[in-house]
Image (spheres, rainbow, N blue to C red):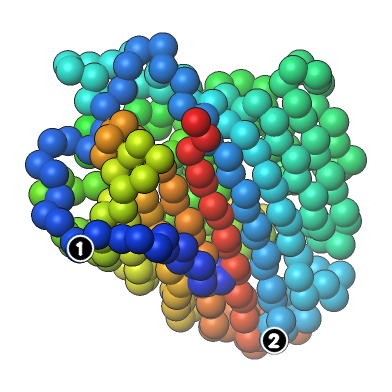
Amino acid sequence: MRFTTIGLELALTLFLGTRPLDAQETQKPYKFTKGQILRCEVVGDLQISLRGSHPDFIKGGNETPLKMGYRALFENVVTETGGSGETADLERRVRTLSATGELDSTPFKFEWDREKDGDKAVSTDARPGGMVDLFRSWCTRAWRFRVDADGNFSSPEPDCDRLLMKAGMMTWPIKSGETAWLTEEKIAVPVLHDKVIMEFKNQLVRTDTGAGRKLLVIKATPRLKKTEKADPAIPGALPGEFEVTVGGDGAVEMDTTNRRLHVVKLRLTIRVAGKSPVAAGGEGDVRAEVVFVENQIYKD
């Protein structure tokens, strides 16, 4: 299978003044109130390297087809709740967003502030299908999603089950009463298109108390579960069998006082190696590394 790399190293921030590890509460971790607005700041970075690949796979000789950074303030608005408020329908809305980077050697910049710009996003790259298109879609409409009492996520939005696409939606599955559990995440990277499904081993490390909240501090360690091949009709989708490796780290903090997620920090690295047909006949090497870093922090 063909795919790209995703660099995965996550800086795990741990606070001082911890308490011994307690048994986790048995109440459901998440609870919502209709009309509630949950604010979240997201800072992210994504880079793709094709260094070591055959020249046929390196457009314009550029070994780094994508590198970008972004910062956003999101508001998740609870539109409906079910039962006792432990399941909710939400809409993710952007308040501010800035992004800069390079796609296929062309720099881009995107800036948007809902208060100042309304529906007029400012950008320097109008190419269809580029990263600016993605960021514009974040700003011009509300993205719908649902979270249940355990933090399980679903959405009717296309491809919104993937990391990056669901930036700011602030959910992570938590198993009440358990100190270790497994969760899944998907990631698909522009340029290479295949999906990587990762399984995270979540380990409750300790509990912290401060600033009027009790936090469960969780270490999330990823491994490759499987890959999903892209539709061969997609431009840039490469045929062939590929070896994929996943590495990195995650840090999650669950606020059990207010029953909402407080922090998610991920640093992921995915490396891909294999061969694919080249124009001159035979096969050429495909080497890819993608590094994805994203920090999401709840804003009071």
- Taking the spot 70% from the left edge, 31% from the top edge, the residue there is 96
* Mark 1 residue crowding within 10 angstroms, few (<14) / some (14–19) / many (20+): few
Across and down, in percent, residue 176 comes to: 15, 45
Q: Is residue 88 visible?
A: yes
Inspect the image, locate mark 2, and give the three-letter code of the amino acid beneath it.
Gly
Mark nearer the viewer, 1 or 2: 1
Across and down, in percent, residue 127 comes to: 83, 42
Q: Is residue 18 above or below residue 131?
A: below
Q: Is residue 179 left or right of residue 92?
A: left
Q: Is residue 218 left or right of residue 100?
A: left
- Taking the spot 74% from the left edge, 17% from the top edge, the residue there is 115
- Numbered label attached to residue 229: none
* Mark 2 residue crowding within 10 angstroms, few (<14) / some (14–19) / many (20+): some
Q: Is mark 1 in CB contact (under 8 Å) with mark 2?
A: no
Judge by depth and name the residue closer to the eye, 273 or 152: 152
- Give the Cα distance between marks 1 and 2: 48 Å
State the image quarter where residue 68 is shown: bottom right
Inspect the image, locate mark 1, and give the three-letter code of the amino acid beneath it.
Pro
Q: Is residue 3 visible?
A: no
Label 1: element kind: loop
- Taking the spot 72% from the left edge, 21% from the top edge, the residue there is 114
Q: Is residue 75 left or right of residue 45?
A: left
- Numbered label attached to residue 52: 2
Across and down, in percent, residue 270 comes to: 51, 72
Judge by depth and name the residue closer to the eye, 220 or 12: 12
Judge by depth and name the residue closer to the eye, 123 or 97: 97
Reading the image, the residue beneath label 1 is: 20
